[in-house]
Image: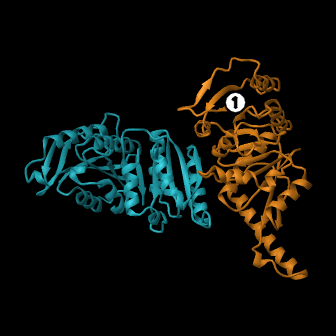
Chain colours: A orange, B cyan
Amino acid sequence: MGKSLIYLNEDLASSIALRFAAQIVKQTGMKLQTIHVEEPEKEEQAGTGWVRRTWEQGLIEAGRDSVQRLLKTEKVDCSFAGEAKVVVGDPETAIMEELLHGIYDLYIEGYLNTPHSQDFHDLLATRRLRHMSCPVLIVKNLVPSNRVLFLLSEAVDSTQLIQDFTQLFSQAPERPPIEVTLFDYRFMETETLRFLDNGNSASPIHDAEKLLMEKGWGEPEVLIVQGTPEQAAHYLKDYGLVVSSYPTRTSPRAELIALIPNPVLLFKQAVQPEKE
Amino acid sequence: MKILLAADIENYSYVAAQEAARFAVNTWADVTLLGLEHADKGTHEISQRLAKALNTYIEFFTAPSSPFAGFDDRSLVKQGDKTWEMTASGQEGRKKLRVLVRRGDALENILAQTWEDEPDFIVVGGAVAGKPEWLGEINLPQKLASTAPCSVLVVKEKKDPETVVCCLDHDHVSQESLEIINQLVTQHRAQLKVVGIADGKGLAGKVEAKMNEVLRYYTERGIRSWVELVKSEDLSQFARNASASSLIGLWLGKQSLLKKIFSKRMLEQLIGEAGSSVLILK
């Protein structure tokens, strides 16, 4: 059975992430492993031997209590892989080590969206996400998980993205009732978002459409759209989870992923150049 | 819930009356409709124009299926030198509508009625820049929002907001204010965005906890709610941008930093420039 790792703190972003993660792990048939990292203040890091071990143990107990309080408050209904892992140290290093040793299929964390897209780009640039070995789900808000939108562009290998996404659901006890949309985004400065004709059956989006149907996910809605990232982000608010590949830092798709308030599930792919 | 609707004869009051009526009919609120007239009318009877406007506003509340149904044989009875109260027969509905007229300084009269009625919130219309304003009183809605002891909804032009954006920086949120927002979101079929205001150290723990509570309250009621974090130094710009198409709500509690961020002048500016309605929650 697959496993997801969720990074929790006792805060709003983690509450939202936990509630959304519970929906996703149920749909995929995975188990959820929680991790919390107690980051000591620099002036706190003193002592050796027994003194240090006692001090660390105190921090671990406090961290375990905070995760327990969060789990008790949120009362999520999903299957857990085990007790919360509580580590003292630097969160970047602790999460990377856990991912390396734990063999996870998905990493999840919460994020409160801001009007500045740079804040999200900075999150994607952190060591833990840059070196991530599995797909990453960043939960910005709580939305219904039964609407999934694949955000595609010429830089995304759409069939690979579909393969990777459906692989996540391969252990699901049954196919979840999810409505799927394929959204081919093309940047253009326009007054309003433009919806283009999707009649050309040779385009990669139609390969993705065929693949989804072959895998039993039904016929998706197909949209080819031109506009600014702001216009597209506004439109996508009506959808649920947005699935795409890791964007390069300066592309319009990266800007769109940063601006959307929806949760985003990102898969690593071989980097293909994106138009700036 | 108790609502005070303050209205004159201008178009913004017509729009505000429609908004207040939709709200009151859906929530079965107690309503006082306060008609306001200029002091230079002396001690004569109230003008035909105000009487006509009031009758129009009353119709918004008293449709046959409304809890305020029936309000016939209307007559304004003088109560004092500068006050009138409307009597009516046939109020078959479950709720009673109270209609009053006060002549004189509009702001003073609205505040006087507020102290008397103790409403949960006041509804007033906000004039579009360059159009006639409240009986010659410049920036009345802005002054009211700053001075009233209760929440104030300043209704701008008749436009359904796409989103109701509520900004929070403290942990005192009244049940009434949650219900006002709930109703406005439902009434306009809008989405809700709860914005936490972060200072230099980030979002305070108690604000996060309150935002989570607010989020849970609306999610349980099937209202799609978004959360966002805004730094205090960016808030006035954020509010100005959002107010073009969203109804902005500001929780101005006693312990609120928003009071410092939104000085009286900035609050007046926001209400004056907003393209959509503004809700000041207290």
Image coordinates for residue B205, horizontal then vertical, percent? 62, 65
User: Three-letter amino acid code at disc 1?
Assistant: Asp
Question: As rendered, which of A145 and A100 lies closer to the eye?
Answer: A100
Taking the image as shown, residue A130 lies to the left or right of residue B100, namely right
- Report the chain holding disc 1: A
Can you give x and y, in whole percent of width and height, for residue B264 in the image?
38, 62
Query: Can residue A84 be seen in this snapshot?
Result: no
Please state if A275 lies on the left or on the right of B38 as rendered: right
Front residue of A133/B106: it is A133
For the C terminus of chain B, give its image quadrant: bottom left
Q: Above or below — where is B197 with respect to A52?
A: above
Q: Height in image: B60 above or below B213? A: above
Within-10-Å neighbours for mark 1: few <14, some 14–19, many 20+:
many
| Residue at 44 percent of width and 61 percent of height | B262
Q: Residue at x 66, y 52 (%)?
A: A118
- Closest to the observer, A249 or B251: A249
Tell me if B61 is positioned left or right of B182 in this view: left
The local secondary structure at tag 1 comes to strand
Q: Residue at x 40, y 47 (%)?
A: B277
Return the residue nearer the eye: B239 or A60.
B239
* Residue A215 in picture, x, y percent from top left: 82, 26
Residue topped by disc 1: A184
